[in-house]
Image (cartoon, grey):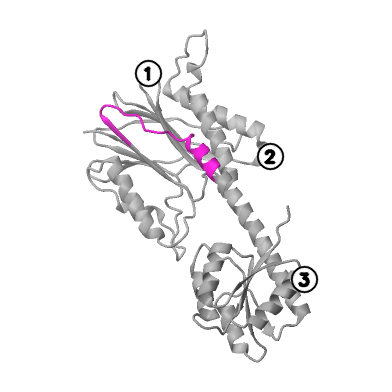
Amino acid sequence: MNHTPRILIVDDEPFNVDYLEQELEDLNYETIAAVNGEEALEKIASESPDLVLLDIMMPVMDGFSVLEKVKANSTIRSTPIIVISANNDLKSVVKGIELGAEDYLPKPFEPTLLKARIQSSLEKKRLRDLQDMYLKSLEREMNIARNIQKEFLPNELPAINGWEVASYFKAAKEVAGDFYDAFLLPDGMLVFLVADVCGKGLGAALYMTLFRSLIRAASTSDQFSPGDEPKNYTPAERLLHAVSLTNNYVIETHDTACMFATVFIGILNPENGHLTYINCGNDPALIIGEDGKIHAELPPTGAAVGVKVPPKFTVKELTLAEGELLLAFTDGIPDTQNINRDFYGNNRLRELLTANSTPAELLKRIETSLNEFIGEAEQFDDITLMAIKRKA
């Protein structure tokens, strides 16, 4: 059904109102009238007109005051307003446009000009309304996507006797390319990872769900073999199986997309602190001692997942001593930029390392530092961290 535009005429001169009503009704528009600014504000709020023809010089409240109040009100500021002014009053016209008027009409009214400017303003409003509808629809879809993506992140981190585990995740947009995971295998081993899919926005988010699902499924594939005895994978074999299967699947099935992910993935034995890991092109994880100093860095041991076949991933091993903390993070930390386009870098991160920090305390300190550094700037990249500490 077509909507008949409704136009509010605001003028304290009855002759002008009568003339405009007649002209607009001949053009098949509905009309409403107000004789001063206060009445105009009430009717803009209650009647939701498609367009307002607003006289500048009126008693009680002039047109300038009406414009200021309308544009200051978020619920009605999008209502288009055409100011009405005498031909020789260009200064008032300019002020009206500066205050947010859509256009102006000179007195005395010329029918052709009246028709043209009303039609132009209504068409612009129609296009804005369509744009608003599209943006609201897109926002709803992005909210749905964000909620679905949240299901691919752990609801809670595993509780392990003698260990503390914490994570921090902040998407740069509605959906993210970063992800993290942490879960226990039936034998009590902890599998954990942080990862970053290349690119930004929805495309990266879609592939994030693919990478996360493949890595999670491949890491636990021996648990889903009905009728068969579970394979007795060593941690090294499990990691190689997970990253190799994911790498090959992505390349062979989605080769034209050229999507890849940097991944730091490890398997931790909580009984003795033994850590088996592969760093697939991710920023080096840090091993931090009780003294707050960096005891070791864990640089890449292979290419990003989804880059080449056959894959070349090297497994590394070490043991976390009592009181040591492992900090893994994506490049959204050093690549964060402030309003001056300075990078956060690795040095600022390292300055936050202090003695005897719990994982939660350290990540909170990093979060606060990042937020202070970003300030008014837009967050450039997804930010993901995971910290795991062996209690002393």
Q: Which residue is depicted at the point 30% across and 32% down?
A: 320
Among the two numbered marks 3 and 2 on one chain, the one whose residue lies closer to the N terminus: 3
| 141 left or right of 160 in image | right
What amino acid is found at the position of numbered circle 3 in the picture? Asp
* Residue 246 on image: x %, y %: 56, 30
Determine the residue positioned at 34% across, 50% down: 366
- Tag 2, which secondary structure? helix
Rendered image: mark on residue 331: none
Q: Position of residue 255 (x, y in %)?
A: 66, 37
Please tell me which residue lies in front, 202 or 119.
119
Q: Is the C-beta separation of discs 3 and 1 under 8 Å?
A: no
Q: Is residue 154 magenta?
A: yes
Tell me: residue 203, above or below residue 378. above
Residue to which mark 3 is pinned: 26
What number is the disc on residue 187? 1
User: Which residue is rendered at x = 36% and y = 32% of the image?
Assistant: 157
Q: Is residue 183 left or right of residue 120?
A: left
Task: Answer above or below: position of 211 versus 89.
Answer: above
**On screen, residue 273 above or below 34:** above
Q: Amino acid at mark 2?
A: Thr
**In magenta stretch: residue 159:** yes
Residue 293 horizontal side relative to residue 12, left or right: left
Please tell me the numbered disc located at residue 256. 2
Q: Residue furthest bottom?
A: 88
The part of the chain drawn in magenta is 143-165
Q: What's the CA distance linking mark 1 and mark 2? A: 39 Å
Badge 3 or badge 1: first in the primary sequence: 3
Q: Nearer the viewer, residue 153 or 211?
A: 153
